[in-house]
Amino acid sequence: MEGAGPVTDGKGLTLDDLPVRDELRGKSPYGAPQLDVPVQLNTNENPYPLPEPLVARIAERVAEAARGLNRYPDRDAVELRTELARYLSRTGGHPVATENVWAANGSNEVIQQLLQTFGGPGRTAIGFEPSYSMHGLIARGTGTGWISGPRNEDFTIDVAAAEKAIAENRPDVVFITSPNNPTGTAVEAETVLALYEAAQAAKPSLVVVDEAYVEFSHRDSLLPLIEGRPHLVVSRTMSKAFGAAGLRLGYLAAHPAVVDAVQLVRLPYHLSAVTQATALAALEHTDTLLGYVEQLKRERDRLVTELRTAGYEVTESDANFVQFGRFEDSHTAWQRILDRGVLVRDNGVPGWLRVTAGTPTENDAFLDAVRQLKKEQRA
Ligand SMILES: Cc1ncc(COP(=O)(O)O)c(C=O)c1O
């Protein structure tokens, strides 16, 4: 049929034949498998759909925004940043003003804007791995060199080794993820302060505390640490606690000068009027959504207890997911669990897998699968 096929010269041109940047050659894009199985516990999403009253409110606010779609949106997203500042002030243990907050399409875009501003060609960023792999990938995408820093055996940050790596490499950006993905490990305020001091002595550099999962933590937010530390940024997202991964809304809190700096790289009108309206509607329902977070924290703690009872090793978790093991061959274990209709994540941490806390029914299905797996392994 005319026009139905792909446009090609018929010679099997591949990505490698294109004049892409050298550092992208031979690389694969980020992507967790999106498999159609009954129980999907692999991408740290919130399992609860948005409540109907919120869905109705989103429809109302989006309809209002639609009436003005002939115009560009508020480029500075002032109303949204004000509401995000109000949320942070209420829950983060530290007063935050509109000028301290910046928002973008997911915290991935926040991180990208930070690396475009403070990283880039000839500059480097460091993270303590295993951690969120997108930090390194966004570094690559922005031409920033990536340094993989160490962790202890128990996945906490080895402070002395981290300080040494910062002093030796003098990175321009330091990533600290708390709670950490994929391990669930929370970072002590003292550790952040020690690494901040090391980073300032070495360069000075920007320290980004990625708090994507902080609402699920047993501990307080590290947000108060921005006070008096103009090079410290806390990044957050509505993808997890607000159950709005599909919305694509991330934000940061920092000194107003950092917010001014990212204006140099952000695309004009990057945050659509529809996104801003939807996020504002979700923030009106904060209390209901945080109620789901409490349920998920209880489910996360149940997963930790039940996995241990079943004979697994579990990393202490402050997130909405749990790292469990150990497996001689984690990929085979992942496949066995998948064979029972449950999709978990093989993050490439040797010996370990990660499961996201789902609904009680989903978690029961997961626990049945891993108990079975243990029986097979013992047999
Ligand atoms: C540690 C961490 N930071 C940031 C993100 C990105 O979140 P989003 O771009 O959906 O806000 C994720 C997503 O899984 C994450 O695990």
Image (cartoon, rainbow, N blue to C red):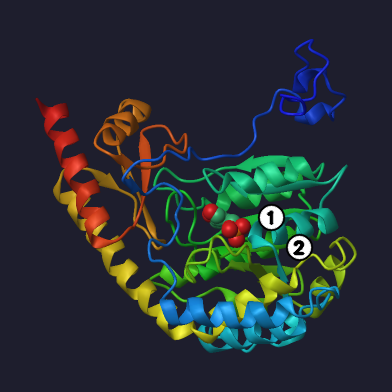
Residue 230 visible within the image: yes
Picture coordinates of residue 272, whole percent (x, y): 75, 69
Please, what is the three-letter code of the amino acid marked with disc 1? Answer: Val
Secondary structure found at label 1: strand
Which of 174 and 317 lies nearest the eye of the viewer? 317
In the image, is the residue at mark 1 within 8 Å of ligand 1 by its beta carbon?
Answer: no
Picture coordinates of residue 40, whole percent (x, y): 37, 47
Residue that carries the numbered disc 1 in the rendered image:
174
Report the residue at 24% width, 36% height from top.
340
Q: Which mark is residue 200?
A: 2
Number of numbered tags placed on the structure image:
2
Residue 228 visible within the image: no
Q: Quadrant of the N terminus?
A: top right
Residue found at the very far left of the displayed protein:
379
Q: Is residue 284 left or right of residue 152?
A: right
Q: Residues within 10 Å of mark 1 (few under 14, many from 20)?
A: many
Q: Quadrant of ligand 1?
A: bottom right
Q: Are marks 1 and 2 in contact (CB under 8 Å)?
A: no
Please, what is the three-letter code of the amino acid marked with disc 2? Answer: Gln
Residue 318 placement: quadrant: bottom left
Q: Nearer the viewer, mark 1 or mark 2?
A: 1
Q: Quadrant of the C terminus?
A: top left
Which circle's residue, 1 or 2, is located before the other in the chain? 1
In the image, is the residue at mark 2 within 8 Å of ligand 1 by its beta carbon?
Answer: no
Residue 9 placement: quadrant: top right
* C-alpha gap between disc 1 and disc 2: 10 Å
Picture coordinates of residue 229, whole percent (x, y): 72, 75
Residue 53 placement: quadrant: bottom left
Report the residue at 34% width, 51% height from top.
315
Which of 296 and 289 lies nearest the eye of the viewer? 289
Secondary structure found at label 2: helix
